[in-house]
Amino acid sequence: MNDNIRIAAQVVPSPRQLAWQELEFYSFIHFGINTFTDKEWGLGDEAPAIFNPEEFDAKQWVEVCKSAGMRGLILTCKHHDGFCLWPSSHTGHSVKHSPWRDGQGDMVQEVADACREGGLKFGVYLSPWDRHDGRYGTSEYNEYLKDQLRELLTGYGDIFCVWFDGACGEGPNGLKQVYDWDGYYEVIRELQPGAVISVCGPDVRWCGNEAGHTRESEWSVVPAELQDCEKILEESQHVDDGEFARRSNSRDENLGSREAIAGKELVWYPAEVNTSIRPGWFYHAAEDDQVRSLEELLDIYDKSVGGNSTFLLNLPPDKRGLIHENDARRMAELGEVIRSTFEYNLAAGAQATATETAGEANAAGRVLDGNRDTFWCPKEGTEQASIELDLNVEQSFDTIVLKEHIQSGQRIEQLHLEYLDGAIWKRFSECTVVGHKRILKFPEVTARHIRLTIDKSRWCPTLSAFEVYLSAVE
């Protein structure tokens, strides 16, 4: 084993990255002036007077998210048009000059409070591009954006995520902005040290498309150069023609293989899969019959949450200020299937044995104890090993969930699964990386004994969970 692979095996997440990864599934809420103009990108000249969601109910948003099994919500506090959903003291272009709540409202506060009451983590999206503010394109604008960050990060409780995109167009003065990313990050780290800075930031990277496409091998350990947000986001947030959000971009498909990381400085930089439940990011009545199907959403969920990523799904409220009935219904259906599928772990009472262990603290049975902090592993330097489950009785199953102990790093590169048919072991599934979570789907199998063989890993593999399920849907 070369030194670079040993080093790669020991790159680990920060506490904030680990907490974010465990959320797994959370919502994006695109809401603002565009909701009332039927646009995706506002021009910045819209009058605050048109913003008046008379039935706005933040608790409804939270309940819809919870019905799907989501654990967090990120609100577009300011999009490219510059209109602020909170009464910012640094601009008049905000809810305080709208008829909503007679100009006395603070939507960010109401959503943050509803999330806290409902048990969801709350995050903020703040567009660096501002098509309204006359300071855009100057050093003064960078200070203005930092002031906006300070308001959002000090007035609304704990923030789990600050989400940036890389959109950079002209302001009303015809100028483009040179963003002070390091300055923005400094403010966030000072005021919300537990918040991840997502996508255009150092903690979480964009998966590379807005279509829900996921890589077969999604490595969290990648070259440090990928943290250059301008390189990552040069194709992000295109003006939406109704097609961009559905297109996959296979650019940079291989980010973390041995060949891709050879000779490079490495960081823990995990992926987030973001897409919308509709073709657009903001609500458009014409898209009421274009809500993604349950089957499509389940597939994205399995491949993102179950592919060492997180799943950020956009739910755009309508002009009433409510998530539309069609979207809400689909979220409830999705949550029901997810809960039903993963409700009963058939391996909960199983027995586990392994070809090798590093000692009692890392015994095979650790994969069955439901504790994220315990794990099985062989001795250091052992890159291939097997672990076998005895389910005690024959069980039918079509889903297996695996988790590495990512606090120790991401190490598994390839594995396969077999079941015992009489005296013969028959292969039924395989995969490459595992990471935080791998969900494997396959035609239904009935067996008592299951064997997992790690064919390739870095330094020595770890496995924190080995779970067995039967899906709730055919």
Image (spheres, rainbow, N blue to C red):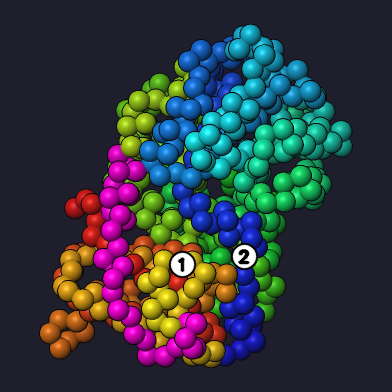
Residue at disc 1, secondary structure: loop
- Crowding near pointer 2: few (<14 within 10 Å), some, many (20+)? many
What label sits on residue 371 in the rendered view? 1
98 and 67: which is toward the camera: 67
Quarter of the figure with the N terminus: bottom right
- Crowding near pointer 1: few (<14 within 10 Å), some, many (20+)? few
Q: Is residue 445 above or below residue 283?
A: below
Q: Is residue 21 above or below residue 440?
A: above
- Residue 218, position as x, y percentages in the image: 49, 64
Residue 466 falls in which quadrant of the image? bottom left
Three-letter amino acid code of the residue under disc 1 = Asn
What label sits on residue 13 in the rendered view? 2
Residue 67 falls in which quadrant of the image? top left
- Residue 77, position as x, y percentages in the image: 63, 31
Q: Is residue 415 above or below residue 26?
A: below
Say how many tags the image has.
2
Q: Residue at x 64, y 42 (%)?
A: 159
Residue at disc 2, secondary structure: loop
121 and 95: which is toward the camera: 121
Find out whether residue 353 is within the magenta segment. Answer: yes
Q: Is residue 303 above or below residue 75?
A: below
- Residue 401, position as x, y percentages in the image: 36, 65
Tell me if I can see residue 93 in this picture: yes
What label sits on residue 103 in the rendered view? none
Three-letter amino acid code of the residue under disc 2 = Pro
Disc 2/disc 1 C-alpha distance (Å): 18 Å
Q: Residue at x 61, y 55 (%)?
A: 204
- Magenta-drawn segment: 333-362
Find out whether residue 193 is within the magenta segment. Answer: no
